[in-house]
Amino acid sequence: MKKNKNLKVAIVMGSQSDFKTMKLSANILKKMGVRFETKIISAHRTPKRMYEFAESASRNNIGVIIAGAGGSAHLPGMISAITSIPVLGVPVESKKLKGLDSLLSIAQMPKGIPVGTLAIGEDGAINAALLATAIIANSNPTVKKKLNNWRSSQTRSVKKNPK
Ligand code: RP5
């Protein structure tokens, strides 16, 4: 694969209300030194914005898309329908069904249009960013080093015995 140090991650979310969760993805990418942008894009409320974003993502040097949405969460799947850039879906915890609706909407994609689905809520947002970092790291040795250091430090932080 061609080395491209400029690949960015896009973190997109269906609503301002998703940012409480999705900012955890942004925090991880900051720590890893991965370039990223954040946008509010709704599959239902701003379909034109969604189409234009997905259609131009490759030209804009986006290498991975993290898409968070809650409830009837069609954003990750619809973006994946428009672009072949890897899409990681974060099911945001919804008020009514605690994110089970989001999880099923994001995970149950028809074959041919994949979305890598993460866990519901904050864990999913953090892991989506770690996975995006790992994808970017394939063509960026500096990012790979940061990711491996972060993981080693996490391992060291786990105590052997409970207090
Ligand atoms: C989805 O509807 C969003 O992703 C959000 O999780 C959910 C609720 O949105 P708001 O009513 O809070 O704007 O599209």
Image (cartoon, rainbow, N blue to C red):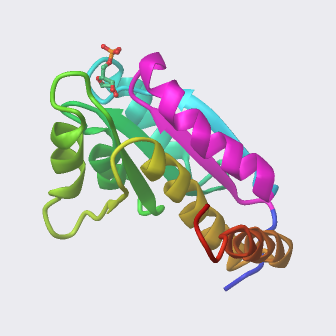
The image shows residue 159 at horizontal and vertical percentages of 67, 71
Residue 45, how many percent across, how many down?
A: 30, 17
Return the x and y of residue 25 as percentages of the image width and height.
Answer: 59, 45
Q: Give the dominant element type of the magenta stretch: helix, strand or loop.
A: helix
In the rendered view, tell whether residue 103 sits above or below residue 41. Answer: below
Image-based side of 8 in relation to 13, left or right: right
Q: Is residue 31 magenta?
A: yes
Please tell me how many numbered marks the rendered image carries.
Answer: 0
| Above or below for 132 versus 25 | below
* Image vertical order of residue 78 relative to residue 84, above or below: above
The quadrant of the picture occupied by the C terminus is bottom right
Tell me if residue 40 can be seen: no
In the rendered image, which quarter contains the N terminus? bottom right
Quadrant of picture, ligand 1: top left
Magenta residues, start to end: 6-32
**What residue lies at 67% left-to-right and 68% top-to-bottom?**
136
Left or right position of 20 against 150: left
Residue 34 horizontal/vertical position (percent): 76, 55
In front of the other: 75 or 3: 75
